[in-house]
Image: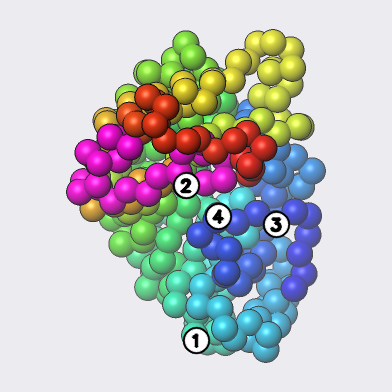
Amino acid sequence: MHYEGNIFRPPSEANSILLQVTTGCSHNKCSFCSMYAQSRFSIKDDSIVKADIDFAADHCRRQRRLFLCDGDALILPQPRLVAILEQIREKLPWVERVGAYANPKNIKAKSVEELEQLHDLGLGIVYLGLESGDDETLKQIDKGADAAVMVEMGRKVRSASIKLSITVILGIAQQQRSRIHAIETGRVLSLIDPEYVGALSLMLTPGSRLYQQYEQGSFHLLSPRQMLEELRTMLYHTELSDGYFHANHASNYLPIKARLPGDKAATIKLIDKALRGNVPLKPEYMRGL
C-alpha cells in the first residue's frame, strides 16, 4: 500500500483495510489537533489508489471493512469517489462496509442524492468531529462551523441512510464554559440523533495551538472530577432515539458504553458512583490517544 505521512483512523476501524485516497486534512485549522500538521492536503492519483485496491484484493481477503483515509476523503469530487467505490465493490466483494471521515464543508458540497449514491455503492458510515455544540467553544477551537451548520450537516448524512458517528471532546471548553459546553453538546446531539457518539477526554498534543496556549498559561485543563461532571451533564442532556453513547476511548477516565435511551439512567448512576469515589478511575499513565 502506498501510504504517505501518518495514517489515522477511528478506533472502530482498527481491523479495516486502510485505503488512502487523500493526504492530510482540507481544513487543518482545529486548535486541538496536530494530526496533519506535517501533511499537505492533496488528492492521490487515481493510478495509485487503483494499485492499492489491487494489492488489497490479493492480501486483505479477511477484512470485511474498509476505511478511506485521510482526514476527509468525502471531499473527493463525486465522479472520482464513485469510481473508487465501484472498484472496491468489483475487486473487494467481501467488503461489507466502507467508512470515511467527514467535515461540514465536504458534507455541504454533496447533495443528498449524491450521498445516497455513495451509500448505495457501499459507504456505510461517516465520522464527524462535532467536538462541541457550543458556538463560542467552536469559534475558540477554530472548527470552521457553528452548531446550526453541524446539525444541518449531520441530519443531511442521516437522511441519506448513511450511519453517523460523532465525536465530542470533554474538557475542550475549559472550566468557564464547561457546563454550557456539556448542555449545548447534548442539545445538538439530540437534534442530529446519530447512531454513535464517542466522547473523548482532551489530551494535549505537542504541535497543536492548544498545547501552545496551555504552555503559555492561557488554556487550563479540567481535573478528572471536572471531566466526569461534564460527561454526566452532557449525557443527561443527550436524547437519542436508538444510539450508542460511548466514552470508552483510551483517553477517558471512566469507560462507559451506553445504548440510549435504555441505559441512560444506569450510566448516570455509574458516573455518580465514580464522583463519590466508589468506582476507580483510570490512572493518568494509562490514558492515551
Q: Nearer the viewer, residue 246 or 51?
A: 246
Task: Provide the secondary structure element on which disc 1 rests.
Answer: loop
Q: Residue 93: which numbered mark, if any?
A: 1
Residue 256: name its quadrant.
top left
Q: Nearer the viewer, mark 3 or mark 1?
A: 3
Q: Can the viewer see residue 214 in this picture?
A: yes
Badge 3 local density, few (<14 within 10 Å), some, or many (20+)?
some
Q: Answer yes or no: do the residues labelled 2 and 4 have beta carbons within 8 Å?
A: no
Marked residue nearer the N-terminal end (2 or 4): 4
Looking at the image, which residue is at 46% across and 21% down? Answer: 226
Q: Residue 7: which numbered mark, if any?
A: 3
Q: Quadrant of the C terminus?
A: top right
Identify the amino acid type marked 1: Pro
Task: Provide the secondary structure element on which disc 2 rests.
Answer: loop
Residue 77 vs residue 39: left or right?
Answer: left
**Gap between marks 3 and 1 measured at Cα:** 24 Å
Q: Residue 280: which numbered mark, if any?
A: none
* Residue under label 4: 10
Q: What residue range appears in magenta? A: 249-270
